[in-house]
């Protein structure tokens, strides 16, 4: 699936897991398991608990997503 097909949603990181996986609580109240996107991994952008992020969520499986952007505070 292309990155253009994802629904971009905003949320807050609530838990960090190993291997670049995070639990993100969306503004709608849903909880999503999200991985770091390719550019975030390549440029070693750090994401910690409490950061506001943009998550790309697939319309086929809305429980998984990709962290595409970390918002500045």
Image (spheres, helix red, strand yellow):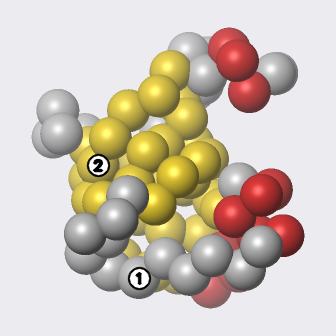
Q: Position of residue 41 (x, y in %)?
A: 76, 70
Numbered mark located on residue 18 in the image = none
Q: Earlier in the sequence, mark 1 or mark 2?
A: 2
Residue, disc 1? 48
Can you say which quadrant of the picture contains the C terminus? bottom left
Can you say which quadrant of the picture contains the N terminus? top right
Q: Position of residue 17 (x, y in %)?
A: 53, 81
Numbered mark located on residue 11 in the image = 2
- Determine the CA span between mark 1 and mark 2: 13 Å
Vertical arrangement, residue 48 with respect to residue 3, above or below = below
Quarter of the image for residue 13 reads bottom left
Vertical arrangement, residue 36 with respect to residue 47, above or below = above
**Residue plotted at (49% across, 68% down):** 22
Q: Position of residue 27 (x, y in %)?
A: 18, 39
Q: Residue furthest front?
A: 72
Q: Toward the viewer: 20 or 69?
A: 69
Quarter of the image for residue 50 reads bottom left
What SS does tag 1 mark? Answer: loop
**Residue plotted at (63% across, 59% down):** 35
Tell me: 4 left or right of 50: right
Q: Position of residue 55 (x, y in %)?
A: 48, 43
- Find out whether the residues at labels 1 and 2 contact each other: C-beta distance under 8 Å: no
Q: Residues within 10 Å of mark 2 (few under 14, many from 20)?
A: many
What SS does tag 2 mark? Answer: strand
Vertical arrangement, residue 5 with respect to residue 23, above or below = above
């Amino acid at each position: 699936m292309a990155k253009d097909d994802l629904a971009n949603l905003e949320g807050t990181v609530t838990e960090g897991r190993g291997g670049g996986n995070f639990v993100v609580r969306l503004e709608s109240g849903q909880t999503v398991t999200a991985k770091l996107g390719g550019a975030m991994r390549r440029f070693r952008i750090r994401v910690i608990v409490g950061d506001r992020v943009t998550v790309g969520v697939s319309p086929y499986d809305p429980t998984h997503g990709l962290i595409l952007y970390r918002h500045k505070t």
